[in-house]
Image (spheres, helix red, strand yellow):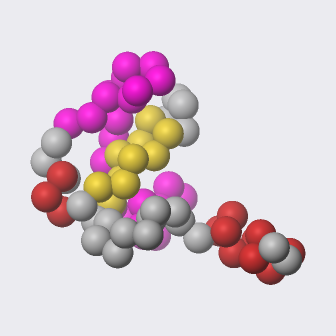
C-alpha cells in the first residue's frame, strides 16, 4: 500500500462495502461508529464499550461525518 492509499483510507469513511449507508451512530466518549441504513435510523443505540447513549449523525458537512 502506498502513501496515497494510506491517506485516502484515513480520510474516506469506512462503509464496509455497503453503499446503502444513511448515517451512523456515534459514541462521543469512546469514538465508536456504527453505520446504519435508512431502515435502522429510528433505532436507539447504546455504546457497546461504555453503555452510554449514542447519537445519530447524518450531516456530511460536520466534523463527525457519517457518510
Q: Main secondary structure of the magenta part?
A: loop
Whether residue 23 is visible, yes or no, is yes
Residue at 42% x, 43% y is 26
Q: Which residues are magenta?
A: 44-67
Depth check, front residue: 5 or 12: 5
Q: Quadrant of the N terminus?
A: bottom right
Q: Quadrant of the C terminus?
A: bottom left
Residue 62 location in percent, x, y? 47, 62
Q: Quadrant of residue 48?
A: top left
Q: Is residue 53 magenta?
A: yes
Depth check, front residue: 62 or 34: 34
Q: Quadrant of residue 18?
A: bottom left
Residue at 28% x, 65% y is 22
Residue at 24% x, 61% y is 37
Depth check, front residue: 15 or 45: 15
Residue 25 location in percent, x, y? 35, 46
Disc tally is: 0
Q: Is residue 27 magenta?
A: no
Q: Vertical placement of 24 versus 45: above or below?
A: below
Amino acid at each position: 500500500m502506498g502513501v496515497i492509499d494510506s491517506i485516502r483510507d484515513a480520510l474516506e469513511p469506512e462503509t464496509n462495502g455497503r453503499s446503502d449507508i444513511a448515517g451512523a451512530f456515534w459514541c462521543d466518549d469512546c469514538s465508536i461508529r456504527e453505520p446504519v441504513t435508512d431502515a435502522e435510523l429510528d433505532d436507539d443505540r447504546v455504546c457497546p464499550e461504555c453503555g452510554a447513549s449514542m447519537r445519530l449523525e447524518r450531516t456530511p458537512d460536520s466534523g463527525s461525518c457519517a457518510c
